[in-house]
Amino acid sequence: MTFADLGLSPKVLSAVTDAGYTQPTPIQAGAIPHALLGKDILGIAQTGTGKTASFVLPMLTRLEKGRARARMPRTLILEPTRELAAQVEENFIRYGKNHKLNIALLIGGVSFDEQDKKLERGADVLIATPGRLLDHRERGKLLLNGVEILVIDEADRMLDMGFIPDIERICEMIPFTRQTLFFSATMPPEITKLTEKFLHAPVRVEVSKAASAATNIIQRLVKSGSKPWDKRETLRNLMKAEDAELKNAIIFCNRKVEVSELFRSLLKYDFDAGALHGDMDQRARMQMLANFRDGKLRYLVASDVAARGLDIPDVSHVFNYDVPIHAEDYVHRIGRTGRAGRSGKSFTIATKTDTKYIDAIERLIGNKIEWHDGDLSTVVASEGEDDAPRRGKGAPRRAGRKDDDRKDRGERKRGGEHRAGRSEDVAPVVVAQQHEQLDVAETAVAENGERRARKDAIRSDNTERKSSDRNEQRAPERGDTRPQRDNSRPARQRHQEDNDSTVGFGDDMPAFMRIVAKV
Ligand code: AMP
């Protein structure tokens, strides 16, 4: 099947050809013809499957007739996070290059005024996070009774983030006669209920993982002492060892505090790194992401939430600085590499306290992960003898070791309380100390303007957010704090019992999973 068989308009087909796509993906082949006929769609698919184009392309074709009126958008796309919303906007710009459409993006963290102006002009396409959309509505700046097509994307993430009541409210504000395109990676009972309430005779298109997990990603576990400076040294050694093959890498940490600390440490060691986490302001996040995507940054230190669902093609390496506490996050993380059939490598730094999390990951993926250079037994033995081990027994001393030691000793001194462990309790102390660390790091790289800009961006992670964005007030991004993550567990677990085939992987289609379409 080709795109020409799907019924898309010539303008859309031309943009698709320019994007270099030759064949529709299964979700596109399954959804587009029905969407063009005005039918409701229930798409069960994750990011990475071509899901975005499966609704953007038919919407563009349908929008060719008619035009927008002030404050009355013609279509509405709801996304759970600002990054996903911005990504959908990029898709509209790319595929809509032959159309003259007004697109408005309503997300938190940016001023209302600009957004108001776009609404006033009349939006053909309105892309929004639920909280900001409702804020605009309550300010009387937005009328939803002209919406002809409603897209609810990543519905299961909306559920995790507590947005379902908002979604219900929004659905009730939009005319009953609308077309609804509804996407979710998984179908927990709450989501099924929502679809039963708001979809009319939907065409169900499901893209699920195959039973076997063939992999084009080389996965390795790497032993390390558990102190932060041990882990940082392990990471640096790995990065240096992989240098020849490494095009770019995402380095995942479990917590925002670790993202900040590791980012600063890497800058000190002259790695070309940026950072991405949920507390950075929106502009800084988007800029950081764009720099990474464009190859201006080689390393991106990120939290799970900041990186979820983002379309960053062609990442050669993933480093897990921390073993993820939730096994499915491992699948999301390593799924950032090896996309679109390319090969990739992932290294997970493991300490002796991580064994139960590793067991859970191996159970989930149904495979043992190989150790890169011997397992943890040597590290466990040496930690018993030495309060601050630097390497596994018998590991060779590296050249440049003294320099590394000196820099890390500095960090250790400043790191103070944080040495005690990974407990959330220590976070406030660490945050307070980061200002001091930042100053030191800033002096070290004062000549480099670009780096300084990056540090300015990360500085915002220590600043209380004052945004009126309801998304953030009500539901800080999933995964940024443990209590919130825990709240999301029951829904996910229930779902895992209900539906073996998708195992609650949330928003990403891991690249090593085959796509099977059931229409
Ligand atoms: P999505 O699932 O929408 O996040 O898309 C994942 C990636 O697949 C994006 O980088 C798209 O540009 C790309 N993509 C979408 N449709 C196709 C297609 N038919 N052929 C090749 N790549 C595609």
Image: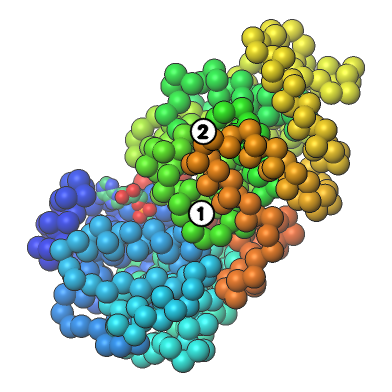
Q: Quadrant of residue 128?
A: bottom left
Give the SS element for disc 1.
helix
Residue at the (51%, 60%) spot, across then down: 282
Residue at the (69%, 42%) spot, across then down: 439
Q: Which residue is mark 2?
A: 272
Badge 1 crowding class, 10 Å Cα cut-off, few under 14, some 14 to 19, many 20 or more, is many
Q: Is residue 506 visible?
A: yes
Q: Earlier in the sequence, mark 2 or mark 1?
A: 2
The x, y position of residue 426, in whole percent, is 83, 48
82 lies above or below 500: below
Separation (CA) of disc 2 from disc 1: 16 Å
- Label annotation for residue 201: none
237 lies above or below 167: above
Residue at the (77%, 11%) spot, across then down: 393
211 lies above or below 495: above
- The C terminus sits in image quarter: bottom left
Q: Respond yes or no on whether mark 1 lies under 8 Å from ligand 1.
A: no
Q: Are marks 2 and 1 in contact (CB under 8 Å)?
A: no
Q: Is residue 361 visible?
A: no
The foreground one among 277 and 329 is 277
The x, y position of residue 232, in whole percent, is 68, 29
301 lies above or below 344: below
Amino acid bearing label 1: Arg
Q: Quadrant of residue 149?
A: bottom left
- Left or right: residue 144 versus residue 369 is left
Amino acid bearing label 2: Asp
The foreground one among 57 and 491 is 57
Q: Respond yes or no on whether mark 2 lies under 8 Å from ligand 1.
A: no
The foreground one among 80 and 179 is 80
Badge 2 crowding class, 10 Å Cα cut-off, few under 14, some 14 to 19, many 20 or more, is some
The x, y position of residue 229, in whole percent, is 74, 29
Q: Which residue is mark 1?
A: 285
